[in-house]
């Protein structure tokens, strides 16, 4: 039975999908460049002298081949690298759909902003998660921002006995003004340990060498396909080359296209083009292999959601949909925390409101 999945659409995933769409600017730029080449200018001159269908076909073939030669390697390298980012990000953002609800409106009691972030994509986005935590502390009356853009704890903080160690660490260093907003590894470590101890995630088992070898099978199979294709097409390519050698020199585009049609060489031209594309794909894959391996290693998280963690992640997924579809929290600023309470905190940590993150970050920069 096929397991139904849900995927968190986070900013990182959207960013890489935008990059993937922008890759098509590479062939477009190469097409414009090929038109500016002397061969491109000569092709348009031929069209002015012989405005017929064969000349038009010749121009299309010329620009297609030149664009292909110029763009195929950078396009495939970008495609492979970006697709690797997308696939690994999707894997981290994917949860199992158990209860199949689209919206969840109850408060996510017991989940800190950083743990919510971990359950969405198995990672901590420190700038956003710390900003959401600050908003939550202010809402709970544990922390307040004073006039000189610094923070002070309140009397309620000292009376609060159910804070996690990561909360006390963050509040303490916010008050001291020495919290590293970019990459505080100690805070991240504390949050991760709490997420594990509370049963939301668990550490993965170390993969065996056999499983790591499976990743080499795809490029090996692709190389073998290329080899057998070349062997099987060798005689056809020799015949194709022999016929091309008989073509008249200094012929116009229309004459070249007519020569290919009369000698039934169009299928061979298509096969040669496909072989070139396939070869360039293998070349691009080899060039990007090191980068792809680094991406996989970086994005391969050492943790995975438990069954309970997956259930809470599904609730978070429903909360994100609820905030997105039924509220205007994306436009709210910090003052609205009194009205919306934890829902504004959820909007920040679930990337439905980034202006509060920027506001808190700006306050932090001004205090330095």
Image (cartoon, rainbow, N blue to C red):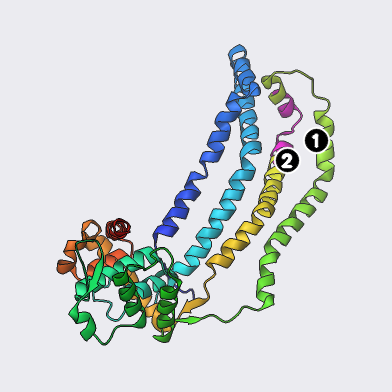
Provide the major secondary structure of the magenta segment.
helix
* Mark 2 lies on residue: 272
Mark 2 Cα within 10 Å, few/some/many (few <14, many 20+)?
some
Q: Is residue 266 magenta?
A: yes
Are circles 1 and 2 on residues that touch, CB within 8 Å? yes
Q: What percent of the width, then of the height, locates residue 301? A: 52, 72
At x 32% / y 57%, what residue is drawn? 365
Q: Position of residue 32 (x, y in %)?
A: 55, 29
Depth check, front residue: 185 or 128? 185
Please give the residue where the numbered disc 1 appears in the rendered image: 240
Q: Is residue 257 above or below residue 77?
A: above
Give the camera-side residue of 360 and 173: 173
- Residue found 40% across the figure and 58% down from its top: 11
Residue 358, image x, y percentages = 30, 56
Gap in angstroms between the C-alphas marked 1 and 2: 10 Å
The residue shown at (52%, 62%) is: 87
**Frontmost residue, 90 versus 276:** 90
- Residue range highlighted in magenta: 258-271
In this picture, residue 203 sits left or right of residue 143:
right
């Amino acid at each position: 039975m096929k397991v139904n999945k849900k995927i968190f659409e986070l900013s990182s995933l959207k960013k890489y999908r935008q990059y993937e769409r922008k890759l098509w600017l590479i062939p477009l730029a190469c097409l414009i460049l090929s038109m500016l080449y002397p061969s491109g200018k000569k092709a348009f001159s031929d069209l002015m002298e012989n405005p017929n269908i064969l000349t038009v076909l010749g121009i299309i073939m010329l620009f297609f081949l030149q664009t292909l030669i110029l763009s195929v390697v950078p396009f495939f390298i970008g495609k492979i690298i970006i697709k690797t980012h997308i696939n690994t990000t999707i894997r981290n953002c994917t949860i199992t759909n158990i209860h199949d609800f689209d919206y969840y409106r109850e408060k996510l009691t017991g989940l800190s902003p950083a743990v919510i972030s971990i359950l969405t994509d198995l990672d901590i986005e420190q700038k956003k998660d710390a900003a959401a935590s600050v908003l939550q502390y202010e809402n709970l009356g544990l922390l307040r921002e004073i006039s000189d853009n610094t923070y002070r704890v309140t009397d309620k903080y000292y009376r609060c006995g159910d804070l996690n160690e990561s909360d006390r660490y963050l509040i303490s260093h916010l008050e001291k003004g020495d919290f590293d907003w970019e990459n505080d590894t100690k805070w991240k470590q504390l949050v991760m340990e709490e997420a594990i101890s509370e049963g939301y995630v668990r550490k993965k088992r170390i993969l065996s060498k056999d499983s790591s070898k499976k990743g080499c099978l795809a490029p090996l199979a692709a190389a073998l396909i290329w080899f057998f294709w070349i062997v099987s097409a060798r005689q056809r390519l020799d015949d194709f080359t022999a016929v091309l050698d008989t073509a008249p020199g200094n012929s116009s585009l229309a004459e070249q296209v007519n020569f290919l049609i009369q000698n039934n060489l169009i299928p061979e031209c298509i096969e040669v083009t496909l072989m070139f594309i396939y070869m360039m794909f293998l070349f691009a894959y080899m060039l990007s292999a090191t980068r792809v391996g680094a991406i996989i290693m970086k994005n391969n998280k050492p943790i995975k959601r438990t069954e309970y963690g997956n259930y809470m992640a599904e609730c978070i997924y429903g909360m994100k949909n609820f905030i997105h579809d039924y509220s205007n929290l994306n436009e709210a600023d910090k003052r609205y925390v009194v009205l919306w309470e934890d829902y504004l905190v959820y909007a920040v940590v679930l990337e439905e409101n980034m202006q509060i993150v920027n506001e808190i970050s700006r306050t932090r920069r001004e205090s330095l």
